[in-house]
Image (cartoon, coloured by chain):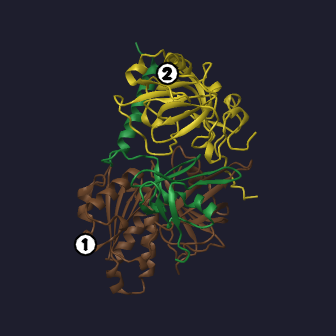
Chain colours: A brown, B green, C yellow
Amino acid sequence: MTAPTQTRITWRVATVLEVIPETSRTRTVLLDVPDWPGHRAGQHVDVRLTAEDGYQTERSYSIASPPQDKQLALTVERLEEGEVSPYLTEELRPGDQLEIRGPIGGYFVWDIAVGGPLLLVGGGSGIVPLMAMIRHRDLALSKGDAVARHQIPARLLYSSRRWDDIIYREALAQLTARDNTLEVIHTLTREQPDGWKGFSRRIDRMMLAEVAWPATEKPRIFVCGPTPLVESAAATLVELGHQPALVKTERFGPTGGTA
Amino acid sequence: MRSASKKKATQKRAKQAKRTRDSYAHGEVFADLLRVDGNAAGGLFGELFAMDITAARAKCAGCGAAELVGALLVYAHGMGMVARCPHCQGVVMRMARTPTHVWLDAQGAESIAVAVTS
Amino acid sequence: MPPISRGFRGRRPTSDAASRLPPGQYETRDFPVLSAGPTPHAPLDKWDFTLRSTAGKSARWSWDEFQKLPREKITTDIHCVTKWSKFGTSWEGVSIDSLLSAAAPQGVEPSPFVMAKSDGGYTTNVPLADLTGGKAWIAFIYDGAPLHPEHGGPARLLVPHLYFWKSAKWVRELRMMDENLPGFWESLGYHIYGDPWREQRYAGDE
C-alpha cells in the first residue's frame, strides 16, 4: 500500500528496538513507531534529540527500510565531528526514545508503479534511500513473477572508499544471488582488496556510459550521496542523453551525511 | 626562522586546502559543498504548510522555469534555508524558524502548486 | 514536553571558555561555513568596493587601490547566532573609519544606518555607530592568508561585536541609509540589531 504524499507532518515518538552494525562507522537503528502512516522508498525523516536541560537539535536521515516493513530502519554514518551521529551510533540503546518527523520527500521516491528500468547511483551513505528502493522492489516483485522482474530490472552503481566501507555489502550480495534482474556494480576509490577486478576509481563519464542503460531505454534514475558526486553524475547522465526529469537527485551535503 | 606553532599552522592550512581540493575531485564544476536540494527542506516546509511540498511545482519569478521543489538548490544551515532556481540561481523561497515562528518569503516564486491527491 | 534523549548531551562549553561566551553559545575550534547561496568567485581585477551616500555620491576602490589603504591587524572572538563562538580569530583589514576618511573628500557623507551589500545578493543592516570608532573593518586576510572564498573572500565586512551574520561575506558596497531597513536575515525573523551579549537572536528578543 502506498502512503499518501500529503499527510500532516508532525513529531512522533519512536522507540529504539535494536542498533545493528553495518560497517565500522555505520549502524542501522531499528525503530518502532506506533502511529507511523507509512512511507515510500526514498523518503527521509527528521530526528530530534532533547537533552535533559531542554537543549534540542535535529538532523535528517533517509529511511533504509522498505514501505512493506512494519519497523522503520534508519542507517546512520558516524561523522567524527558530528553532534548527533556519534550519539545515534554509539550511545543509543534498545528502549531509548527519539522524536521523528516524516515521512518527508515526494520528489526523490520510487516504487514499482513508477516503472523501470531502475538505475541507482550512490556514494557512501547515499546508498541508504537507494537500498530502501531495492528492498521495496524485491518484496513487491517476489511473488514468483519472473516477467515482472524482467520488466523492471534494476542496476546499482555504488561508490565506496574501501571494501570494508561498503554499507549493506552482504545484504546486496544475497539479493543479487537470488535475483538475476538486480545488478550491483561496486567501485572502490581508495583501496581495493587483492585480486579486485572491479572499478577502482571515482564515478566518471566513462563508467556511467558503461553502466547505465542507453537513454532510449528511459531508465528512472536516482542519484544520492555527497553533493559533488551527485552533481557530477547527474550532469553526466544528462549529457549522455537522459532526460533531466528522469534523473532525480538527493544531495547529502559536503561529507555525504549529516553530522 | 619559523616557530613550531607557525609551521603547524601552515600544515593545518595546507591540509584544509587539500581537503577542499580532494572533495572537488569529482566535479568538473566548482560544486558548492554546502548545497543540498529541496528534499532536505521538506521537514521545515512541512511545519508551515502542514504537508510535504517537495513534490510541489514552483514557478521561478526570475526566469519562469517551473521546477519540483525537491529539485531546487537549497542552501540550508542553522539560520534558515534558501531555495534557488537551478536554472537561473535566483532565490525562489527563503525560510527561517525562530523559537516562535516559521518565516517564509516566497516572493521568488510566481506560483506554487501542490497536488492534493497522489 | 518532548521525551528526553537518554545520554544525549549535545555541545557544551568548557569551563574556562564559559566567561568569554555570550549567553547560549558554545566554543568551537573549527570555522563552520554557513551560506545562503553559491560561493561567488570575484576575480580581483574585476573586484571593487564602494561607499555610497544617500545623496548618491560614491567613493570606489579597485583591489589595488584598496590594498594601498591603511590596514590593521585584528584579533577577536566571533559569535554566530547558530550558537558557535570562536575565540581569538585573527584578521587584517581596512577599518570603516579609514574608509570614511578616504571617502570624505569625494563628498560621501555618512548617514545613521548602513546596508552592506554582497556579491550574490546578500544584505545586512548595521547602525553607523556600530561600524565606526574602531569597531568594524573590511577584512581580506584571515589567519595570515588571503581570505578564502568560502569564508567570504576576497573581502568581507567584519563587525565582531554583533552576531556574525552581520559580518557580510563577499561584501562589495556599504550603502548609507536614513532608516534602519532590514537586510536578508533581518527581514526573515532575525533581530534587527543582533547583540550577542543581550542574546538578541530573533525579532522580538529584548
Residue type, label 1: Thr
Say which quarter of the image contains residue A18: bottom right
Residue type, label 2: Glu
Quadrant, the N terminus of chain B: top left
In the picture as drawn, the residue positioned furthest to the top comes out as B1
Which of B115/A229 is in front?
Answer: B115
Q: In the image, residue C111 lies at what x, y percent?
A: 61, 27
x 32%, y 66%: residue = A243
Per the model, the C-alpha gap separating discs 2 and 1 is: 57 Å
Which of C186/C54 is in front?
Answer: C54
Q: Specify whether B28 is left or right of C153.
A: left
Label 2, secondary structure: give it: strand
Label 1, secondary structure: give it: helix
Q: Which residue is mark 1?
A: A216
Which of B99/A14 is in front?
Answer: B99
Q: Which residue is mark 2?
A: C92
Say which quarter of the image contains residue A221: bottom left
Q: In the image, residue A61 lies at what x, y percent?
A: 53, 59
Q: In the image, residue A253 lies at what x, y percent?
A: 46, 51
Say which quarter of the image contains residue C202: top right
Does residue A195 appear in the picture of this structure?
A: no
User: Do circles 2 and 1 both sit on a common chain?
Assistant: no
- In the depicted structure, whether residue B56 falls above or below residue A77: below
Which of C27/C62 is in front?
Answer: C62
- In the depicted structure, whether residue B46 falls above or below residue C139: below
Q: Chain of mark 1?
A: A
Does residue C98 appear in the picture of this structure?
A: yes
